[in-house]
């Protein structure tokens, strides 16, 4: 079905495969088609007239005139305006994003040429280079965000389908208190405070290495992470447990930073960490696993999950749940607690003068006796 319109006003039609009415018009001799998003012909005509006016005044450009570079620049601008911490700058002061830089594959394409098939070609190319599915997905997500920004800005009317690759399950590493003690004994002195901060607070590594003494309040027994200096951009308050407080007092120095070596702020210590974890029998343990351990300890200790999320800095429940890992010991502990609960219920029943037969003894009785 279609609707005829005067010359120069474009045309409306409804494909058999769509419930929406589509529009077609010309721009600089090039045929353009787009969905109006309407099912009413009168409203669809209004959308078409508005789009034609935007084209003629230059407010909007057809997608055929928008290159991938335009999408990339819009995304970088969005990250800059919102002060996203993942936005970095090279020596020349030019902004860049690792996940966006990996999209150079699309440099020669127009926005309307990027579709699901092309994205799958990109994914196969990146896999051949040895990139993980998770890293590839982050880049595809950045591409999707750039398209969405273009739609919000009125530069595009639609976006392609973005296929995503299956990712490996999140890490489940964490350490118990005895393992913490073993690792502390193997680490050099300047890294023990990093271990303590990670294990007892769940702070991210960047938050730990940038921590300054003026953020540590020994009177209130808290650490204050300032707004704009955390991954989420939100400030938060982290409590000091006695052992961490003692470790911080022992680590006092003349530097403004808490974590220092020879007077300079500690930034990279991968080799020292790897060697120490291997000697402690914790080969493969990551610094980030300390954060997972801290979240688990918060929940285990009975802290309400909403408060635990505020302390750890998790904004979404889904990500927090990935860190709140249940181990085999947790399950066994739950079994002991369940046994204690039923034993207590049986004891109270006996004290009230009722028979406290167990299910086992009842099952062993003759059927007539049970009935």
Image (spheres, rainbow, N blue to C red):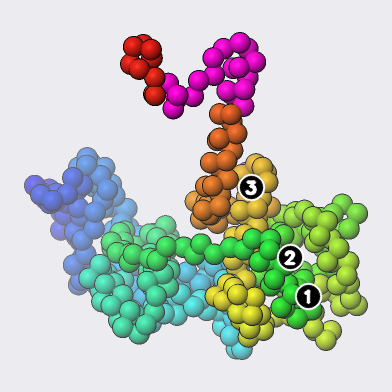
Residue lying at the far bottom of the rendered structure: 91
Q: Position of residue 77 (x, y in %)?
A: 52, 70
Q: CA distance from mark 2 to mark 1?
A: 10 Å
Do the residues bearing badges 1 and 3 touch, measured as CB atoms within 8 Å? no
Do the residues bearing badges 3 and 2 touch, measured as CB atoms within 8 Å? no
The residue carrying mark 1 is 259
Q: Position of residue 194 (x, y in %)?
A: 73, 71
Residue in front for this viewpoint, 295 or 162: 295
- Above or below residue 170? Residue 278 is below
- Observer-side mark, 3 or 2, equals 3
318 magenta-colored: no
350 magenta-colored: yes
| Residue 275 shown left or right of residue 266 in the figure | left
Residue in front for this viewpoint, 40 or 352: 352
User: How many neighbours does mark 3 have within 10 angstroms: few (below 14), some (14-19), or many (20 or more)?
Assistant: few
| Residue 57 shown left or right of residue 279 in the figure | left
| Residue 275 shown left or right of residue 141 in the figure | right
Query: Disc number at residue 300?
Result: 3
Q: Which residues are magenta?
A: 344-362
The residue carrying mark 2 is 197
Q: Which picture quadrant has residue 31?
A: bottom left
């Amino acid at each position: 079905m279609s609707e005829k319109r005067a010359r120069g006003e474009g045309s409306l039609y409804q494909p058999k495969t769509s419930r929406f009415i589509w529009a077609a018009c010309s721009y600089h001799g090039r045929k353009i088609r787009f969905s109006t998003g309407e099912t009413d012909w009168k409203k669809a005509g209004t959308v078409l007239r508005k789009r034609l006016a935007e084209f003629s005044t230059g407010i909007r450009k057809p997608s055929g005139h928008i290159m991938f570079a335009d999408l990339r620049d819009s995304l970088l601008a969005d990250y800059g305006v919102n002060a996203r911490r993942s936005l970095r700058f090279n020596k020349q002061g030019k902004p860049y994003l690792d996940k966006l830089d990996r999209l150079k594959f699309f440099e020669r394409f127009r926005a309307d040429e990027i579709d699901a098939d092309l994205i799958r070609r990109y994914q196969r190319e990146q896999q051949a280079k040895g990139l993980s599915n998770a890293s590839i997905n982050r880049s595809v997500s950045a591409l999707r965000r750039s398209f969405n920004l273009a739609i919000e800005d009125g530069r595009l009317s639609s976006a392609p389908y973005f296929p995503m690759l299956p990712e490996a399950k999140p890490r489940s590493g964490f350490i118990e208190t005895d393992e913490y003690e073993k690792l502390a004994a193997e680490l050099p002195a300047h890294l023990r405070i990093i271990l303590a901060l990670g294990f007892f607070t769940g702070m991210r590594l960047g938050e730990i290495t940038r921590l300054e003494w003026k953020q540590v309040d020994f009177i209130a027994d808290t650490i204050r992470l300032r707004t704009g200096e955390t991954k989420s951009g939100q400030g938060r308050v982290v409590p000091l447990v006695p052992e961490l407080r003692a470790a911080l007092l022992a680590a006092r120095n003349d530097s403004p930073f808490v974590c220092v070596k020879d007077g300079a702020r500690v930034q990279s210590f991968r080799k020292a960490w790897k060697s120490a974890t291997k000697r402690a029998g914790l080969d493969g343990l990551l610094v980030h696993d300390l954060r997972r351990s801290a979240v688990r300890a918060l929940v285990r200790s009975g802290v309400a999950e909403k408060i635990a999320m505020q302390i750890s800095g998790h904004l979404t429940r889904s990500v927090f749940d990935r860190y709140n890992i249940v181990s085999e010991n947790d399950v066994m502990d739950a079994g002991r607690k369940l046994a204690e609960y039923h034993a207590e219920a049986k004891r109270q029943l006996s004290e009230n003068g009722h028979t406290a037969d167990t299910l086992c003894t009842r099952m062993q009785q003759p059927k007539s006796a049970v009935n």
